[in-house]
Image (cartoon, coloured by chain):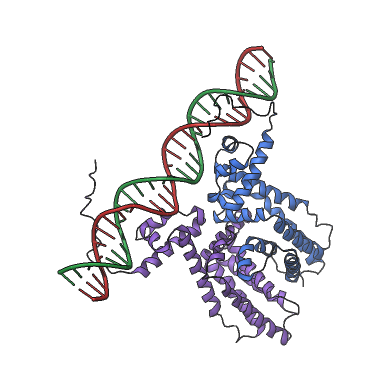
Chain colours: A blue, B purple, C red, D green
Amino acid sequence: MVTAPPLLAKRRKSASWTQDPEGVRRDILAVARAEFVENGLSGARVDEIAAKTSNSKRMIYYYFGDKEGLYRAVLEEAYARIRAFERSLDLAALPPREAIATLTGFTFDYHADNPDFVRLVMVENIHHARHLATSTKISVLNLSAIDMIREVYERGLADGAFREGLDPIDIHLTISALSFYNVSNQASIRQVFGHDMAAPEARERRRRSAIETVLRMVCR
Amino acid sequence: MVTAPPLLAKRRKSASWTQDPEGVRRDILAVARAEFVENGLSGARVDEIAAKTSNSKRMIYYYFGDKEGLYRAVLEEAYARIRAFERSLDLAALPPREAIATLTGFTFDYHADNPDFVRLVMVENIHHARHLATSTKISVLNLSAIDMIREVYERGLADGAFREGLDPIDIHLTISALSFYNVSNQASIRQVFGHDMAAPEARERRRRSAIETVLRMVCR
DNA sequence: GACCAATTGAACTATCCAGTACAATTGGAA
DNA sequence: TTCCAATTGTACTGGATAGTTCAATTGGTC
């Protein structure tokens, strides 16, 4: 028989502590991302997230309101990150061909290096992007990616390297598809073909193939 | 106050009825597919599936054992269908270029016409293809798709239409990626770019782009 | 050092939900 | 007709789970 813990001698952290709301938020968000990415929105358990946090479940509700609020915060953070990544690209200095190759390579790497992001986008698409739609922090923004491509494409047209009649969105979709699919469908590809796309050699081969495919699509 | 229905005067279908286990199975499977596709494995509710069936929840457990068994059956049926589709393709009669173009077009159309299949594969990948792995009915089979591509590719090499050094799996992955992504990420694409990939014109443009991209990848 | 607002903890609740018990009914074989 | 095995319906259960209650503690401000 284990005696019940003293009910009144509790309520004590290690001596003294400092308030660190941002730290708590970050901690919860990181744990929550891992859970949502692993189990989806319906599959994730608030109790499980709370247990893996250094705080209690109460804090989750205090900071994020409810499970969906927490999920939305995770989603917003993930989109903020990839936006920051896109902004960090500077293609203007490169000649068109190299610019497209670089963009494709970086996009491919971002997806391969951030399977969490890919899986979160999958989860969100299963939910028909309902939370993307209602989030005020997201929306608008991603047009910068298209603008970047448009700029490079027009330079490529001007110097005769690229062929006419392409739509920047179409180029973007092709780059995204070739970057996304290997990661999103990694598990079923492994089951069906026995290929581990996460293995360094397979990944590198696929990366080269993606870049070459996009170049062949765009160039004359 | 509503009086309770008579407890002993129940148990009656319309006069007489015939046993139709296969019909019941099909009915349940169709409803279950819709539910799993819409809400994922964790999000789907057995009670909801039962309610939309013309039978009771009891039948689901009678025929499929448990929720996972039902999900596995749905998954197996979906894979059986796409296998049948692949077998129905006859590329041997076509010259290599046309064969690849046809394969890409048909694959694109299959995905666009069967978003349920695409979403089911997404759900399964979120679960790390665990059910694909344990299902005895699936596995093996999909190598035929690769063999088909290999055959066409070798003919294309022989008659000089295709360039050397490509891997049939790589070709397959490219075709799949370009067919899958527009459907799997339809919702987030619409949110972020305002483009509805399911609209006939957008779909047709993307289809042509996919075929051209694959041809440019493969041809000399 | 007192007070207030922000922050935190533990136990609790109401609901949902997968799965079951058990009896009843039926089709078909003998 | 009788009987058994295959089906089917109703009501129920036990556990999981999102979210709440309420009191307590703390940091910072005056």
Percent from the top left, x then y, of residue B45? 45, 53
Q: In this view, does A149 lie to the left or right of B149?
A: right
Residue A89, quarter of picture: bottom right
Residue B111, quarter of picture: bottom right
Percent from the top left, x then y, of residue B58? 36, 58
- Residue found 40% across the figure and 59% down from its top: B61
Q: Is residue B40 left or right of residue D14?
A: right
Furthest residue to the front?
Answer: A1
- Residue found 72% across the figure and 61% down from its top: A108
Where does the C terminus of chain A fall, quadrant-wise?
bottom right
Q: Is residue D30 left or right of residue B116?
A: right
Percent from the top left, x then y, of residue B60? 39, 60
Q: Can residue B198 be seen in this view?
A: no
- Residue found 66% across the figure and 70% down from its top: B173
Percent from the top left, x then y, of residue A88? 78, 51
Above/below status of A81 relative to C29: above
Of A148 and A80, nearer the camera is A80
Residue A25, quarter of picture: top right
Above/below status of C3 relative to A126: above
Of B171 and A151, nearer the camera is B171
Above/below status of B24 relative to A141: below
Above/below status of B114 relative to D21: below
